[in-house]
Image (tube, rainbow, N blue to C red):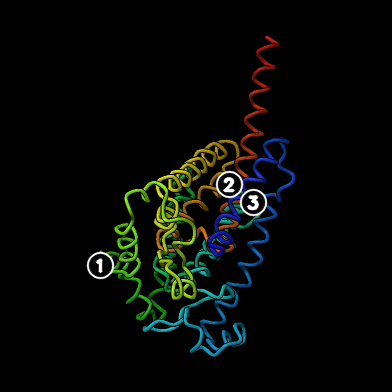
Amino acid sequence: MFEGFRHEVLFVLLAFSLLVYGLSRERSDFLPSLDIVGKTILINGFFSALFGIWQYFDISILETLYRSPLEEIGSIRLAIGYRLAGTMFNPINFATFLVLFFLVINYFHERRKVSFIVYYFSLILVTGLVVGSLSRLALMSLFTVLSFIYFYKISVLRLLFFLSLIFPLMFYFFYNLDLETIMSRLETIFVLSTYTENARFEHWIYAISNLEPYQYLWGKGIGASSPDYSVTSVTSALPIENAFVSIFLQYGVFGITILLSVVLRYIYIGCYLSKIDLAKGKFILGFLLLFIVMSLGNDFLRNSPFVLYFWFFYVYVEVNYSIIFNRQRLLKNSTSVAR
């Protein structure tokens, strides 16, 4: 219960407190700007990507970073080989952070603060490192985010440029590197049994089928789910590894309704902001897409730093939406009175 409170409820309480403060004062300057947060992500992403490249050529760098022999770093090794993890201590977190890193680059690119050369070089680099992480879900997230970026209010010329430049470069990248072991894992993305016969899927079915009738409404309570093996191995907590199923298991229909309400509110405000500031709106919606896709196979509502970003961006857009909406309403009323 303490572990669940620390990783779930504490962030919600913090976000709610900041939201109440911001809405009551009608101010957003108590939060760091999106540019400042973006620059912080860029710095962290740059160094993580740098070590990811280094790891590709010299796997022993991980022993220096993690201060452990490679054999004891369980998250980076599969039967087909080692996975890139950068400085994130986990290949899934590494790949997810790289997608977020590219989202920030796209945000600054649309604000004309990043050149197109840096932009497309970063895209190729991020794609290669995500593939090297061997995370199928992260690769799906990357292509989902890219599809959103390039098809949401995009100019035709920019889309044609993307298709004419990126596809040939990616073909060259895959053709000239020995990716046989990587592709043997990633090609299973399109196989149905990859999901239906996965241990995670079995855990979801087992958890839901063992709920008592009254628990469908309120759930089993906090701590019934945990992504931490050290917790599930000594307690009755189940390793769900799906944010939505995990919330439903712990808090039932009540909890999942609140979560879906937040997500829908996120989408609405993101679309609203994109009409005023396209770069900002696309970043918010792109991050939400990334978070949702990754949450389908991981408990990202407990995964730092992504859960922190999730609630921070929600407070940020909610407060800014309230300020913009109230200003527009006052302007409309004053115009009506003047007439």
Residue at 62% of width from left, 57% of height from top? 115
Mark 2 or mark 3: name the one nearer the start of the chain: 3
Left or right position of 319 against 213: right
Number of the label disc, if any, that sits on residue 193? 1
Name the residue carrying label 2. Answer: 314
Q: Residue at x 63, y 72 (%)?
A: 47
User: Circle 2: is it few (<14), some (14-19), or many (20+) Cα within 10 Å?
Assistant: many
Mark in front: 3 vs 1: 3
Position in image of residue 146 (x %, y %)? 46, 55
Q: Which mark is residue 153?
A: none
Choose between 28 and 217: the one closer to the eye.
Answer: 217
Element under disc 2 = helix
Of label 2 and label 1, which has the lower sequence position? Answer: 1
x then y, percent, for residue 235: 45, 71
The answer to whether residue 237 is above or below residue 109 is below
Kind of residue indicated by mark 3: Leu
Residue, disc 3: 14
Tell me the SS state at disc 3: helix
Q: In this picture, is 278 found above or below 42?
A: above
